[in-house]
Amino acid sequence: MSSSAPAPQPASSASASMSASTATAPAENVVVLDDVVAGYLPGVNILNGANLTAAKGELIGIIGPNGAGKSTMLKAIFGQVKVRSGSVTLNGEDITGLRANKLVAKGVGFVPQTNNVFPSLTIAENLQMGAYQRPRGLRERVDFVTSIFPDLGKRLQQRAGSLSGGERQMVAMGRALMMDPHVLLLDEPSAGLSPSRQDEAFLRVSEINKAGVTTIMVEQNARRCLQICDRGYVLDQGRDAYTGTGRDLLNDPNVIGLYLGTLGA
């Protein structure tokens, strides 16, 4: 993990720092959210000026209390919520509000928390659906996915509906990887899993990131998320309250006291 990121800082300082990085080295940033205001209902904002940068190859963790806007931030990137002001860029290109199919073609993969597989299809068919827009090289992509999730390679003809929650999560992540994305968005990959399956999910996320995929992960398991991420964002009331390296946030007294409690001790 990177050792050059700044120590945890409050939102005002973080925003200034991110604006500077965007201005000086835009090519290094895969995803940039700049002062995004977004919501689902007219006049009701969930994000209230949220900022985020993800450089090439980084693993970014997003934590915070329930209702802070964590999942909404991912949906703002993936065009699933109305962005009322601010912008979202991918490799320097404005993608604010683009439809999901266009974002997938541009290299954005998204794994929602629930309803993330086609239960009536086999594992192989689910993976094939992931490459629908780019069928060439299907065999190579399947080989790549099964190298990260070897259990899937042994059961390609099994229907996804018969899998456990953890196994379905592997299929969903694998399908998102079939398009060789620039960035992978993960919405609570450990939700509803047993402790052993949670550990496996975090291991697979790390392996995906180490394979070169920039990864942005929302997680309720704040401690484990911060342990594996390069940098983290703490969201509160739709804003990035603190940002810093995962280790720094995990040990920051303010973050512990306000958001982690004994988890960060």
Image: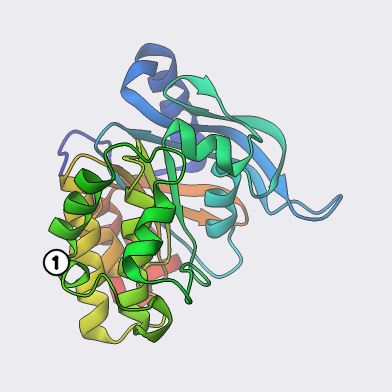
Vertical order, 28 against 220 (above or below): above
Amino acid on which disc 1 is placed: Pro
Q: Is residue 107 above or below residue 117?
A: above
Query: Residue 214: percent from the left, percent from the top?
Result: 30, 40
Q: Quadrant of residue 183?
A: top left
Residue 247: tell me if it is visible: no
Based on the displayed image, in which of its 4 quarters is residue 237 positioned? bottom right
Q: Which residue is mark 1?
A: 150
Residue 95: image location, x then y, percent: 57, 29
Rendered-image quadrant of the C terminus: bottom left
Q: Quadrant of the N terminus?
A: top left
**Which residue is pictured at 43% across the width and 48% down the height?**
242
Q: Is residue 244 above or below residue 71?
A: above
Residue 46 position (above or below residue 101): below
In the image, is 83 to the left or to the right of 91?
A: right
The residue lying at 18 percent from left, 66 percent from top is 153
Residue closest to the far right: 42
Horizontal and vertical percent for residue 187?
Answer: 45, 61
Secondary structure state at the residue bearing disc 1: helix
Label total for image = 1
Classed neighbour count for the residue bearing mark 1: other residues with Cα under 10 Å, few (<14), some (14–19), many (≥20) = few
Left or right, 199 with reference to 87? left
Q: Residue furthest top?
A: 24
Q: Is residue 95 left or right of residue 112?
A: right
Foreground of the two, 217 or 35 = 217
| Front in this rendered view, residue 184 or 117 | 117
Residue 148 visible in image:
yes
Q: How is the image coloured?
A: rainbow
**Residue located at (41% from left, 52% from top):** 130
The part of the image, by quadrant, that contains residue 256 is bottom left
- Residue 193: image x %, image y %? 34, 82
